[in-house]
Amino acid sequence: MVLRVLDDQERPTVAYKLRLIVQSQVEPSMPEKKRSKRGKDRSLYHWTYAQMEQSLAPVKNISASTFVFRPGIIDYLGGFDSVVALTELVLVPNAHEPHNSADGEKSRGNWWLCEGGPGVPIVNVRVPILSVALRPPATHDAMAGLYKPELLAPYLKLDQGDSIQAEYIWIDGDDGLRSKTMTVTKEVKSIDDLRIWDFDGSSTNQAPGHDSDVHLRPAAIFKDPFRGGKNILVLAETYNNDGTPNRTNYRHHAKKIMDLAKDEHPWFGLEQEYTLFDADGTPYGWPKGGFPGPQGPYYCGVGTGKVFARDLIEAHYRACLYAGIKISGINAEVMPSQWEFQVGPCEGIEMGDHLWMARFLLVRIAEEWGIKVSFHPKPLKGDWNGAGCHSNYSTLAMRSKGGMKAIEAAIEKLGKRHEDHIAVYGEDNDLRLTGRHETGHISSFSSGVANRGASIRIPRHVAAQGFGYLEDRRPASNVDPYRVTGIIVETTCLQ
């Protein structure tokens, strides 16, 4: 919810006191003497204490922090130590007006601590909340990048004749994405119509400066949702000057595995989780300097305070459909500002191609919104879910009648190579695979029907019908899809 304080034109004869009841993992770190001193000067806040309520999560204590705002000012929440959630608001008009500082300087839109006692309570409203928006999201003009779609729009309408813009996209040396565009003068019907290009690998952590040329070989083509028309996006593999695959080119090895196992017809469906952040590093839609309410109402949520940036997510969904990506769905995830999209089913190497292009579109569209996308598996410490890339997998034998035997055999093979899989299932995955928040522990392998705390989950309907697929819940959100699909097929089909 958004709390509104009357603006200066509507200013009453009282100042407003906003009391925030918060859940805290630890007591505020400010010493008592310092806390008392700050309560007398032009401090932004002072601390008081309240006993823990039974209805709240079992944390060490609850601190009640009292704030006084000038009417019309409610834009930033800060000064908390280890706050994990806001639980309710109490709005109490106070009979004392905001004052000037001791040196005579007037308020510049900051907060002021009222002195002289609690005043006469006229209104005392307790409001249970999910989250508090204490200032609106920053506008595009306030963001780095300053994207101006209204300025670009008329130029995108210009006739480009028979020329085609082909944007080459590749994976860099830090598991990020890069792109550059060339003009093609003939219609592109397949990757054979595109030439091999190159780039400066010393600037992308993919080559030394003395031998910096890295070559881009087209691997897959998609329609361009940004430029429209016949313009295209080209997913490219990276190769060294001597013709060998670059050390960052995991597609090359995965393609060999998929070719060897083509008769097994391996299908994949990947669930890509990610988290959105403001340009300043704050989780998108979260109170500045504070936290939203505990997890619970956000998963597949609907309504203000439960979901954030739905417009961005819908734009990404439609762009993927236009581009020809096999995106199969979207949903808000357990942590606020965490989302998921699903891609598949895709067979063989196609899975990695489509997921990487879907990631590119997401990051590229978020650029226009002034929003950062994080694929880190544990972007926030504390009682918040991590982000994964659950990998649904089947072979023809698993999908056929009586396929449960093939599923069980595959799970047994996956268990024997648990450590090998974990090694390529994403960086910092140990921060996510803790045995909590719907994960199995990174050090052990487990499986079960409908068990989201296991390494491998067999969906309940699959167990009931006796054939279908399995879900590997171990891969992190930052995993390279070529590596995860490659090793799963290698383990279950080629060992």
Image: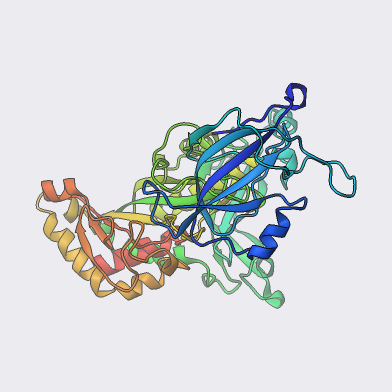
Give the side of residue 152 with respect to residue 166, left or right: right
In the rendered image, the residue lying farthest to the left is: 402
Q: Nearer the viewer, residue 426 or 53?
A: 53
Residue farthest top in this picture: 10
Query: How many marks overall?
Result: 0
Picture colour scheme = rainbow
Query: Residue 238, percent across and down?
Result: 55, 64
Task: Give percent across and percent down for residue 465.
Answer: 12, 46
Name the quadrant of the N terminus.
top right
- Judged left or right of residue 411, residue 10 is right
Q: From the top left corner, tell me how far across and down residue 133 is, in percent.
A: 59, 38
Q: Is residue 338 above or below residue 379?
A: above
Depth check, front residue: 478 or 24:
24
Q: Quadrant of the C terminus?
A: bottom left
Residue 20 lies in what quarter of the image? top right
Residue 40 drawn above or below residue 240: above
Asked whether residue 475 appears in the rendered view, the answer is yes
Q: Residue at x 84, y 46 (%)?
A: 101
The residue at the far right in this view is: 104
Q: Report the residue at 32% width, 74% height from top.
A: 443
Q: Nearer the viewer, residue 475 or 202?
A: 475
Q: Could you say where residue 413 lies in the image, as x and y percent from the top left?
A: 22, 70
Taking the image as drawn, is residue 220 in sight?
Answer: no
Comparing 266 with 285, the one in front is 285
